[in-house]
């Protein structure tokens, strides 16, 4: 506890011990971390914290999520990785996938984020296809960096982290920036920067999406923890593609949280049995759903709109294929 910054200790001191955070924490529900005891200084189950932020979403008095992320950084002695200084991301990016080149335009800039650029770069292609199909000129944000959300960059002070966010937006030259990750969207919003999640942005073009050829799939919608605030917009976009939804409950994918991720993912899979695919709004969810042995195939929302436009190129980069598209 003595290793935590004064700002983090101040957030902990504001906890009213009401226990509301426990009622929404997906890790606690499976015997993992207890956000209430961690706000009291017991970080023994810190590795079971998913970092989803549901605790802060319900708390009106303080910010448990920031406490957990800072605790991960401080107590585990995490440092800003060298890759950040080389390329702006918390890991080294992989080469763009071998996919057809897309036209570029400047109606909007797309901010892919670390996970897309470094783990699932085919989502950049899917987003370009989706936006171009709607006659929205787009290109990648010129000064892409990490959104400054991950624990790895929290050894920087707030002003230094904010300076990177401001640099991101400065490179947009006043044009709108669309994010593919709810975590990026929310982190920028905490600094007063509006960069809508792709689901919110696409929901402005429902009529145009309905005019696309469409896709005949039965899907479950799982926004992902960080994109759950945009679930209504995401549902509207999914329906506009012609896909049928099953009304499943929303839930966390579990990411790789110690001791609980397997149980959480097993629950999600059972809730969605019988669908052709699960549609998500989070690049992390794309990775973790796609790794489930014999699991339900996954699509990012951008991929679903690209499918509705007649493009299924990104299917070859998934471990789990959608049978109807084979």
Image (cartoon, rainbow, N blue to C red):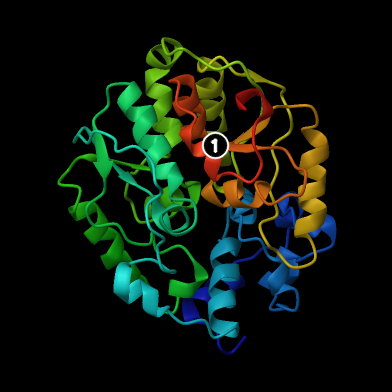
Is 191 positioned to the left or the right of 119 in the image? left
For label 1, the residue is 315
Q: Residues within 10 Å of mark 1 (few under 14, many from 20)?
A: some
Quadrant of the frame with the C terminus? top right
Closer to us: 17 or 324: 324
Closer to us: 211 or 46: 211
Specify whether residue 40 is in view.
yes
| Residue 145 place in picture, x, y as percent | 32, 61
Q: Residue at x 39, y 28 (%)?
A: 130
Closer to us: 173 or 116: 116
Q: How many numbered circles are shown?
A: 1
Quadrant of the frame with the N terminus? bottom right
Q: Quadrant of residue 72?
A: bottom right
Q: Residue at x 41, y 49 (%)?
A: 97
| Residue 13 place in picture, x, y as percent | 60, 73
Q: Is residue 41 above or below residue 125?
A: below
């Amino acid at each position: 506890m003595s290793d935590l910054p004064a700002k983090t200790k101040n957030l902990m001191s504001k906890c009213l011990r009401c226990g509301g955070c426990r009622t929404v924490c997906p890790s606690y529900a499976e015997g993992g971390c207890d956000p209430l005891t961690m706000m009291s200084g017991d970080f023994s189950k810190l590795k079971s914290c998913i970092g989803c932020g549901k605790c802060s979403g319900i708390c009106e008095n303080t910010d448990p999520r920031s406490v957990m992320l800072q605790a991960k950084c401080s107590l585990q002695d995490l440092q800003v990785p060298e890759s950040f200084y080389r390329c702006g991301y918390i890991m080294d990016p992989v080469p763009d996938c071998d996919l057809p080149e897309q036209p570029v335009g400047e109606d909007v800039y797309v901010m892919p984020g670390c996970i897309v650029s470094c783990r699932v770069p085919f989502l950049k292609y899917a987003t370009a296809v989706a936006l171009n199909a709607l006659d929205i000129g787009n290109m990648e944000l010129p000064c892409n960096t990490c959104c400054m959300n991950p624990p790895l960059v929290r050894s920087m002070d707030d002003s230094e982290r904010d300076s990177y966010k401001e640099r991101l937006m400065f490179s947009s030259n006043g044009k709108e920036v669309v994010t593919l990750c709810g975590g990026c969207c929310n982190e920028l919003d905490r600094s007063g920067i509006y960069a809508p999640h792709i689901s919110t942005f696409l929901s402005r073009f429902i009529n145009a999406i309905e005019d696309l050829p469409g896709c005949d799939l039965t899907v479950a919608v799982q926004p992902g923890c960080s994109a759950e605030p945009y679930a209504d917009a995401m549902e509207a976009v999914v329906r506009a593609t012609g896909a049928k939804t099953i009304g499943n409950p929303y839930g966390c994918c579990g990411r790789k949280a110690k001791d609980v991720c397997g149980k959480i993912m097993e629950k999600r899979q059972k809730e969605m049995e019988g669908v052709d695919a699960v549609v998500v709004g989070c690049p992390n969810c794309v990775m973790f759903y796609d790794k489930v042995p014999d699991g339900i195939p996954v699509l990012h929302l951008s991929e679903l709109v690209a499918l509705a436009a007649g493009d299924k190129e990104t299917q070859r980069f998934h471990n789990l294929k959608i049978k109807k598209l084979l």
